[in-house]
Image (cartoon, rainbow, N blue to C red):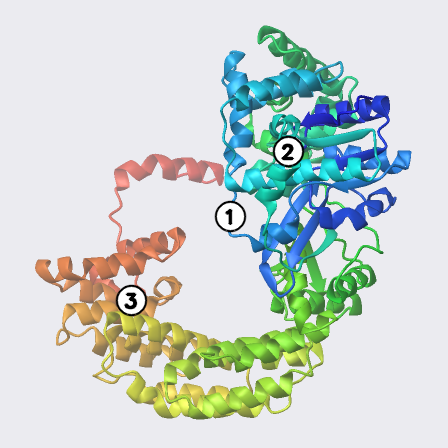
Amino acid sequence: MPAEPALLGVRHHGPGSARAVRAELARLRPDIVLIEGPPEADPLVALAGDPAMEPPVALLAHVPGEPAKSAFWPFARFSPEWQAIRHALGAGVPVRFCDLPASAMFATTVTEDDDTALADPIGSLASAAGYDDPERWWEDVVEHRAGATPFEVIAEAMAAVRDGHVPGPREALREAHMRRAVRRARKDGFERIAVVCGAWHVPALAAPITAKADDATLRGLPKAKVEITWVPWTYGRLSAHSGYGAGVTSPGWYDHLFAAPDRPVERWLTGAAGVLREEGLAVSSAHVIESVRLAEGLAALRGRPLAGLGEVTEAARAVLCEGDDLPVELIQRHMVVGERLGAVPDDTPMVPLQRHLREEQRRLKLKPEALDRDLDLDLRKPLDLGRSVLLHRLRLLGVPWGTARESRGKGTFRESWTLVWRPEFDVELIEASAWGTTVGAAAAAKARDLMTRDGVTLADLTETLEACLLADLGEALPYALDALTQRAALDPDVTHLMAAVPATARALRYGDVRGTPAEGLGKVVASMLARIRAGLSPALTGLDDDAAKEMIGHLDSVHAATALLPESERAAWLAALHGVAGRADLHGRIDGRLTRMLLDAGSFDGAETARRMGLATSAGHPPARVASWVEGFLAGGGLLLVHDAQLLGLVDRWLSGLSGTAFVDVLPLLRRTFASFDAPERRAIGERVRNSGRSGAGGGRGEATVEIDEERAAGAVATVLTILGRSG
């Protein structure tokens, strides 16, 4: 090995580069390997040799107490840097990271400026080679190359592209520190030094720049306190589509190229056929054979050394998927990007909260996964109840591992979730560790903080209380109840109380189902409802269209919530609605909605409802008010008009009696009302009106009056009589 360090310029996360680095290091046998990355991670390198470390993984550096100041350095098994680490550990030689320290990166105000430079050289070289796609050029000359990667040629090409280039501030700092790291390794007695870095940096590391000049560049560099660890990563986050600057478009494809250097096209399309078969699609071995032939033929026509992702995708679309793009998307999701989630050993440095979550995941048999996973829970089972509690606690901590969705089953003892683990959740866990060392303690402390923050509303308090019950945070409930009681007693706005009641009623019900009742919560709910009933009449007065729409939302929510409460509360609420319904000063939409609520609740029978509708649609009211009344009354569905001919007749008579000008004025409201009905409901209403006739629409159900043509019917009658064995 020459006295000068061996500079191995690579493409980050390139399988061809990874194989070439592994082979070159085996040939050179260096006594130290320097790798582009944060030097603070040097003490953690040994963990990469642990069998429990499964890439993709990433180094996570962060400033304690400032989660916004964090950065990741991801590694896949096809990353050249990862292969360099594994080679060095296997050979028993030291590994050091040589990039700018994370402590300086977080402390300096210099912005990132070399991302574009990293992309430009590849584009320039691709253009010189006659390629319009830089990614395709790199794959052809490096990733799909059968022999060794010519590191000297890459260095020469990069030197030509960088000719005349002036590094930006951040780039200058990074490259000066890399050169300093090489000098330090030589000073420490290492003679055979290998440096694995991005190809763009190779000319800068080989440049004759003095130590004095680099020291001047790095002098006075600020530093921040930094903590660093390994965390699991995903191929989805390794993808360039995720916003990762050094990402690749197809990590799953690159993983395949690295793991299957022999016959990669055949193996890939065989795997694609397996994915489609798992989804119930019929794909035979003949399909696979023909798709391989097509991919190889396309590569030959295009002058490529090996069929790339474009060729195998086109072959899969044409043959395996028979031209259908939906199965292609399935292959894209499962194979091109991939669903791999890495793992780190148990002795990896973690904050206590991260470690406790890992223990809970094992206890509850909830394995983190990179792709969406549906989870249906039966809260009557202890295991499922424990899973629900954990997911709700994490949501309180700002770690939305699970997203609640509508349950497939009926009953409050069921929950449905969609789970997907994202690498950035580790940052959220580190931030949340300030609240406690266990998930439960941290969630309870976070809940108490949410209740005491400035500007917290009554609705916020009820949501937090509900979250505490769902998360089984009994220690936080007294704080929630006290805060809720005080705020409810002082809040003069009825709408605020109405907004708070639904969540509080749900919290009371959830407490019953989960076996964690909140003492005193029933009294709080009763107090809020009493104040709502007392203030309902003035709250409904003098509302414009927008305010009426908002108020109806509150009325619907409270009305639904009272169904979860004792019968006495429900009866008192219906009595309050009965007392304000029919008032002349109500907005038409609210008056109609109140009438419908009381009808559905059984407080009004059909005759009383018809009487009230008759009064509301009488000629003495402006057409616009009548239309808004009808809109409020019919909100939620039109089946009422299908099954009650008397109400349908009242609406029909009102519409028929409108003048042309009045009809045009109310048409937008009518269209908005009837457009909310399902198509079968609209069709059934139309049929009822047509078959009943104008004269029958206002009375009973009536029978359709049909004119029968005896002469035209005679032939059909004779045929039926013959079938029945009768004549005449």
Residue appearing at x 56%, y 26% in the figure = 324
- Hey, what amino acid is under mark 3? Glu
Along the line of sight, the residue nearer the viewer: 240 or 500: 240
Residue appearing at x 64%, y 33% in the figure = 210
Q: Nearer the viewer, mark 3 or mark 1?
A: 1
Q: Residue 435 at x, y = what percent?
A: 66, 73
Q: Residue 688 at x, y = what percent?
A: 32, 57
Q: Which residue is mark 1?
A: 110
Along the line of sight, the residue nearer the viewer: 513 or 225: 225
Q: Nearer the viewer, mark 1 or mark 2?
A: 2
In this rendering, position of residue 596 left or right of residue 157: left
| Secondary element at tag 1 | loop
Quadrant containing the N terminus is top right
- Hey, what amino acid is under mark 2? Thr
Residue appearing at x 30%, y 76% in the figure = 590
Please, is residue 348 above or below residue 580 in the view?
Answer: above
Q: Earlier in the sequence, mark 3 or mark 1?
A: 1
Q: Which residue is mark 2?
A: 210
Q: In the drawing, what numbered circle is on residue 631?
A: 3
Along the line of sight, the residue nearer the viewer: 21 or 374: 21
Quadrant of the image occupied by residue 346: bottom right
